[in-house]
Amino acid sequence: MAGYKTPDFSERAAASKAAKLAALEKLRNKPVADPAAIAARDAKEVARKAAAAERRAERLAAAEAEKAAKVAAAEAAREAEAAKAPKPAKTAEELKAARDARYAARKARKR
């Protein structure tokens, strides 16, 4: 049984040339694309891109509307908070009276 024989340069060049010619022949035998089919495919692609752009615009409009509603709700909440009258701060005498009342109630419960 003979061992493996490494191909020399001329054999490798011939194999490369044969492969290139086979690829070129395969390319030549490829059928020509039908212009009507190409036009239909292009029309489908244009329609798909238009539908995608429309969906994107709808999503953007919905997001903007939601953002505007949140801003309006926050503004209404701020206005409602501002409309509430702030409670006047208790004076030192009122705080002392409340503390004394809690103290007296606690003492009364213990008895």
Image: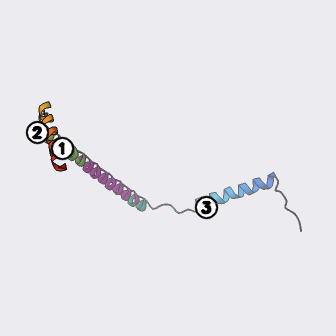
Which amino acid is tagged 3? Answer: Lys
Q: Residue at x 32, y 53 (%)?
A: 50
**Residue 91 visible in the shown view:** no
Q: From the viewer's perspective, is 98 left or right of 5?
A: left
Q: From the viewer's perspective, is 84 left or right of 22?
A: left
Q: From the viewer's perspective, is 31 left or right of 71?
A: right
How far from the left and from the top, in percent, is residue 77? Answer: 17, 43
Residue pointed to by mark 3: 26
Residue 37 highlighted magenta (yes or no) = no
Magenta stretch, main secondary structure, is helix
Q: Residue at x 59, y 59 (%)?
A: 27
Q: How far apart are marks 2 and 3 (CA)?
A: 82 Å
- State the extent of the magenta-drawn residues as a range: 41-64
Q: How far apart are marks 2 and 1 (CA)?
A: 16 Å
Q: Which of marks 3 and 1 is nearer the N terminus?
A: 3
Q: Are marks 2 and 3 in contact (CB under 8 Å)?
A: no
Q: Which circle marks residue 83 in the picture? A: 2
Q: In which quarter of the image is residue 42?
A: bottom left
How far from the left and from the top, in percent, is residue 59? Answer: 29, 52
Q: Residue at x 50, y 61 (%)?
A: 32
Q: Which of marks 2 and 1 is nearer the N terminus?
A: 1
